[in-house]
């Protein structure tokens, strides 16, 4: 009987396999940013095929595609005149909470993070005195990010979340049943010989 248990678990282990995938959720913004007005995005990896039962997120990359409306040369030697600086604050509970950039130029601003499955809530809120989990990347595949720009000289094109995941393919039960019956037959034949 011990032989059959070992054979079954070895069969199940061999039958399952893991695949690495990248899921992307992108949002087109394509407008100039207004100084002092917050902007935000809600990403949903479940809409892109994420399943918390078979998938494990291993790394995340959040990218903002900015363009300066008028190309400016910042004078960092004179901190009293910040009129040409593109100052922006990013907020995300998944990455580092709050990041302050004194000058954002044309190009992509990227945040990277490795990830381990914890099932912990990344951001919670209170509704009628009850704590509600708003962001749980491991279970729902959802996260939010927002920002406040303190300049009128930036154009935001696209914001995207890239998640590298490992997906475990669970085998169908019919082939496992057939293989188990075959192993059971071999085990019974082995027992008779003994």
Image: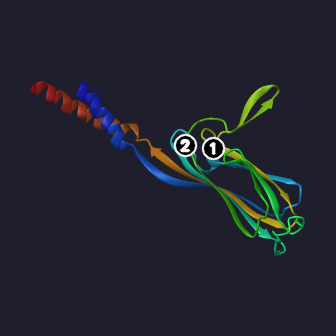
Q: Is residue 34 left or right of residue 189?
A: right
Lower sequence index among marks 2 and 1: 2
Circle nearer the viewer, 2 or 1: 2
Q: Position of residue 178 (x, y in %)?
A: 30, 37
**Label 2: few (<14), some (14–19) or many (≥20) C-alpha neighbours in 10 Å:** few
Q: Secondary structure at mark 2?
A: loop
Assess whether mark 1 and mark 2 are in contact (beta carbons under 8 angstroms).
Answer: no
Secondary structure type for disc 1: loop
What residue do we see at 75% from left, 70% from top?
A: 106
Comparing 83 with 108, the one in front is 83
Residue that appears at 41% across and 40% down = 172
- Where does label 1 land, which residue? 141
- The part of the image, by quadrant, that contains residue 35 is bottom right
Identify the residue at horizontal 53%, vertical 44% (top origin): 56
Mark seen at residue 116: 2
Per the model, the C-alpha gap separating discs 2 and 1 is 13 Å
Q: Nearer the viewer, residue 49 or 3?
A: 3
Q: Is residue 44 above or below residue 177?
A: below
């Amino acid at each position: 009987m011990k032989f059959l248990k070992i054979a079954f678990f070895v069969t199940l282990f061999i039958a399952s396999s893991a695949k690495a995938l990248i899921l992307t959720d992108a949002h087109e913004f394509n407008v100039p940013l207004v100084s002092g007005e917050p902007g935000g995005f809600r990403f949903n990896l479940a809409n892109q095929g994420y399943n918390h039962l078979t998938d494990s997120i291993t790394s995340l990359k959040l990218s903002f595609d900015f363009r300066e409306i008028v190309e400016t040369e910042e004078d960092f030697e004179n901190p009293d005149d910040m009129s040409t600086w593109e100052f922006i604050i990013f907020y995300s509970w998944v990455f580092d909470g709050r990041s302050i950039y004194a000058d954002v130029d044309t190009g992509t601003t990227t945040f990277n993070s490795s990830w381990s499955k914890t099932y912990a809530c990344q951001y919670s809120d209170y509704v009628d005195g009850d704590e509600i989990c708003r962001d749980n990347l491991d279970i729902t595949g959802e996260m939010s990010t927002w920002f406040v720009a303190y300049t009128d000289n930036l154009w935001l094109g696209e914001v995207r979340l890239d998640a590298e995941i490992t997906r475990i393919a669970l085998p169908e039960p019919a082939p496992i049943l057939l293989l188990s019956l075959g192993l059971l037959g071999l085990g019974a034949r082995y027992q008779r010989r003994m």
